[in-house]
């Protein structure tokens, strides 16, 4: 099993004046910018997004029963292009970008190689909220999607596991104001999750910026 030791798994680099760490993981391209936003910026965006985003709790059907997802969600983007996104049987229409979301998008766009046209937001209210193992590999994202993930608020553990090699796993903490970029073949070969916890935790907002390549019929 891979454990989260910086000295073994990360290579410190400099990327367009923002320091980042590149994970040395097989079949993956993952970069972590631990302090992409300052503490003041992070607190500002957290408070603004918490108040202004049109949060909702989605439901999904499993084993014949309806379950509420353990987090609140929203999807924003280029609404002029009638963007839709489907995941876990849930189809969402993009809400028009807010000014704060546009500011955040502008900051991260130079660090990724595709043009962002949407963002999926998750609000983890406390330790009882999380997201189960999954890959961001929906057909409309293309074969090798770039996912740019911003974290504001409570730091949470982010876990990865290889889909075919059972002992290839990695765990790390995503701090307030961090940017995690997953690209290349990462979604094809790896899954990730935010596990629930037993100790008390305050809210965390996560934004995963992405590019929708094509629509489902």
Image (cartoon, rainbow, N blue to C red):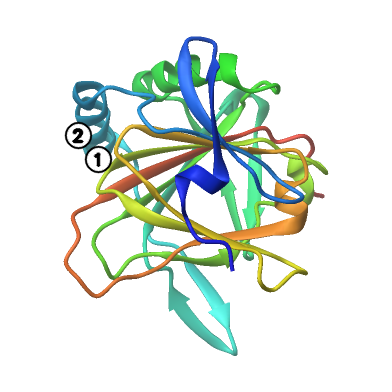
Q: Quadrant of residue 179?
A: top left
Q: Residue at x 67, y 21 (%)?
A: 115
With 97 as the anchor, is 167 left or right in this view? right
**Is the residue 188 above or below the residue 169 in the image?**
above
Q: Secondary structure at mark 1?
A: helix
CB atoms at circles 1 and 2 under 8 Å apart?
yes
Q: Nearer the viewer, residue 40 or 20?
A: 20
Q: Which mark is residue 209?
A: none
Q: Position of residue 120 (x, y in %)?
A: 50, 43
Q: Nearer the viewer, residue 98 or 38?
A: 38
Q: Residue at x 30, y 71 (%)?
A: 197
| Disc 1: which residue | 50
From mark 1 to mark 2, how far is it between C-alphas? 5 Å
List the single residue furthest toward the top.
17
Across and down, in percent, residue 105 comes to: 48, 21
Q: Quadrant of the N terminus?
A: bottom right
Q: Position of residue 18 (x, y in %)?
A: 46, 16
Q: Nearer the viewer, residue 124 or 4?
A: 4
Residue to which mark 2 is pinned = 47
The residue shown at (70%, 36%) is 212
């Amino acid at each position: 099993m891979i454990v989260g030791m910086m000295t073994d798994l990360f290579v410190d680099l400099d990327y367009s004046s923002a320091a980042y760490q590149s994970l040395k993981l097989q079949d993956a391209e993952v970069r972590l910018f631990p302090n992409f936003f300052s503490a003041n910026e992070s607190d500002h965006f957290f408070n603004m997004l918490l108040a202004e985003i049109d949060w909702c709790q989605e439901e999904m059907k499993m084993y014949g029963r309806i379950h509420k997802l353990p987090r609140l969600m929203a999807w924003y983007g280029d609404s002029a292009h009638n963007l839709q996104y489907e995941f876990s049987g849930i189809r969402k229409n993009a809400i028009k970008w807010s000014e704060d979301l546009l500011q955040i998008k502008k900051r991260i766009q130079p660090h990724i190689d595709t043009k962002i046209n949407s963002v999926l937001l998750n609000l983890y209210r406390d330790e009882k909220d999380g997201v189960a193992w999954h890959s961001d590999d929906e057909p409309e994202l293309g074969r090798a999607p770039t996912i740019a993930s911003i974290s504001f608020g409570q730091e949470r553990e982010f876990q990865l596991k290889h889909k075919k090699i059972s002992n290839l796993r990695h765990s790390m903490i995503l701090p307030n104001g961090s940017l995690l970029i997953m690209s290349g073949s990462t979604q094809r070969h790896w899954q990730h999750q935010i596990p629930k916890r037993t100790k008390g935790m305050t809210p965390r907002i996560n934004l995963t910026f992405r590019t929708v390549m094509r629509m489902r019929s």
